[in-house]
Amino acid sequence: MKIGRVIIDIASSLVDNVFDYLLPSEDISVGSRVLVPFGKITKEGYLIEITSNTEYDPSKLKTIISAIDTFPIIQPDQLELAKFMKRKFNTGMCDALRLFLPSELRLGRVKELVKTECFIKDETKAKEYLLTVRKNSLNQISAINYLLEHGSENLTILNKKFNSASIKKLINNEIISTKAVTVRRTPYKTYQDFCNNNITLTLTQQSVVDRITNENNVYLLHGVTGSGKTEVYMHCMQNMIDKNKTGIMLVPEISLTPQVLMNFRSRFGNNVAILHSGLSMGERFDEWQRILFGEAKIVIGARSAIFAPLKNIGLIVIDEEHDNSYNSDSNPRYSTIEVAKERARLSGASLVLGSATPSLVSYHNAMTGNYQLLEMKERINKKELPPLKIIDMGGEILSGNTGIFSNALKSALIKTVKEKNQAMLFINRRGFASFLMCKKCGWVAKCNDCDVSLVLHKYEKSLKCHYCGNRYKIFTECPECGNSELSTGAIGTERVVKELNELLPNVSVARMDNDTTKTKDAHLKILSDFRSGKTQILVGTQMIAKGHDFPSVTLVGIIDADVSLYQSSYSSSEQTFELITQVAGRAGRADKAGEIYLQTYVPRHYVYKLASFYDYTAFYKKEINLRQVTMYPPFTKIIRILFTSESEELAKEAARVYYEQVRNLQNQYEDSFVYLGVMRSPIGRIQNKYRLQILIRLKPNKEEEITKKLFELSSTIKKSNTTVFVEINPQNLS
Ligand code: ADP
Ligand code: ZN
Ligand code: ZN
């Protein structure tokens, strides 16, 4: 008797179990999708195991109806990875398995793109035809000559070039034959460029490449910006291809860093596939197929590319490994680095985490021997990193300047523009101002569905909620007291653009933030206009901080560095240090010297001091001591259990019941709990759902055991109308 164990494709924790079915007579392999009877209906599911025993009465088992795919589309190591995610992050099996498939495949919406290809059926016959055809049938004659020269061409293009009636005639006369061919859609076609492929590695680069290639391990590559990390990744990938292996290269945001993709394509051509949420459904489906069928051996993409259906992986690279986008903080929640470690382990691959500012946790892992540390301390061009000047904005006010630009930054902007160089201005807040407030009674415009103030967006003439997306009309007077004097909160990108336009009226300025990059390829346009010099100053959020290489940028201004320093997070110093280093790295990349102005109200803060010296190691030492004393990660693990419900009572009740159970656990594991508390979340309501949370900090000694129990608890207290999430080391605690 053969039993097939099936995960039903319903993303609900209530059905996230394995169901046993009898196997039909047809041959189905593990990893295939199947159709099964489920209750009174038919559902899709994943066949994850074939065994010969079952806990149930076999005579009562139903039989799998049929296979959906003719071959397994989930690989054995992917199945293992899904199980790992269930253990490690409490991910539902169905949620985990879905990560491996393009959603369009599951929903059966996209088709392969089929085009009609035309070619000359018989050359001799065609040449005879040329002699007999009337001299004024110019289109027919040209089309035949064109095909004789080019071999074949797509029907649509031929019709356009030579008019469809003539082509039709040629097809009817059997001069042209046609056949249907599947065409793979190529995403980011414009990301093709010729890059220098004949680079000789420096000694440092070579030794790093050798280490990575010759010994499977987890490496942390700490290399300053411009030290040639991308070149190292490409050489390692080449070595893998030579060994007939494959590789994954993760980048935080591919549309923001086209250079990486261009470099890889220039070197590896069609061997590169890209997986990214910004692709069209068809593009994504085709790239996924190219990977699955072994047509592409290197996958580049954002975090979800770690789930690519590659076989025989030899290398996984996570570039800018400190980046927050590697943590998925909505369902399914996972840490990409942890998933990558497991995938590398399962496939016997090397994992390389690369960054100029590694996360504290990763660097600590390297210091304690969990990772192998590789260092590249010099820039390829041997240039010093550009000088970073800290500007005291308090002092500016005292000297009578209350504007958003310090006098020093103003002069630097004017000078940059005059010398026909480019500048980037960074402000980590989008919109015009962070809130709108009545000067008389203190009323603040708030979202109806979330407990947050609304952000003023003058350009779109609305007040927007950054948590749920709701939009409201801009108030011109206070709805409480009728006063028409309203004040605005801290400045955002729109305001910076406005002030720039006033300071430098004839200079073209572009703004890059979530609002200006909503449409497909909008990033591309902004970046290419800036690269070509069409715009001279680029204002933006952290989108402009990442990996760009603009040779003419000589000035970088950080308008309000304190935004990130004063977030209420244990890691805000770390994030600020990273951000400054990344932004600063945009200046003076090529021959021209660059400079950075950092505006702050706390000019003596150690984060700014150390960032201005680019002293990562000193920063690490200081910060890691602090974490040890205060018992924060990596010395503890933070667990947040989040309860959300439309009813505040229900959310509170669920939190209370859970909390009691956690108290029992705390008694049982007294010396593992550093902290336990239950509270309203910092943002008490989002999208009309009330939010409460239990916060826990655990010492490493028994954390896995305790985490497992917490996961189990969360499944026992499942109630309708309340959602429970267990989050491990969440970055975002709002
Ligand atoms: P990183 O990713 O560390 O910031 P990149 O890989 O972008 O650095 O390298 C910076 C620049 O140096 C790039 O323009 C790259 O082409 C160039 N480069 C890298 N390695 C070499 C080398 N060995 N010889 C010459 N140029 C190199
Ligand atoms: Zn008022
Ligand atoms: Zn809202």
Image (cartoon, helix red, strand yellow):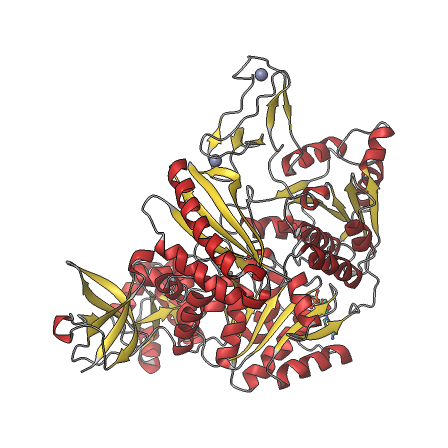
- Residue 698 picture location, percent across and down: 57, 59
Between 635 and 536, the residue placed more toward the observer is: 635
- In the figure, 208 relative to 703: above or below? below
- Residue 260 picture location, percent across and down: 61, 65
- In the figure, 279 relative to 124: above or below? above
Q: Is residue 61 left or right of residue 675?
A: left
Q: Is residue 683 visible?
A: yes
The residue at the point 84 percent across, 36 percent down is: 407
Residue extending furthest toward the left:
59
Between 161 and 354, the residue placed more toward the observer is: 354
Quarter of the rendered structure image containing ligand 1: bottom right
Q: Quadrant of residue 13?
A: bottom left
Give the total number of marks visible in the rendering. 0
**Where does the N terminus fall, quadrant-wise?**
bottom left
The residue at the point 15 percent across, 75 percent down is: 58
- In the figure, 58 relative to 386: above or below? below
Residue extending furthest toward the top:
482
- Residue 131 picture location, percent across and down: 34, 75
- In the figure, 97 relative to 576: above or below? below
Q: Quadrant of residue 267?
A: bottom right
Q: Is residue 300 visible?
A: no
**Where does the C terminus fall, quadrant-wise?**
top right
- Residue 634 picture location, percent across and down: 64, 62
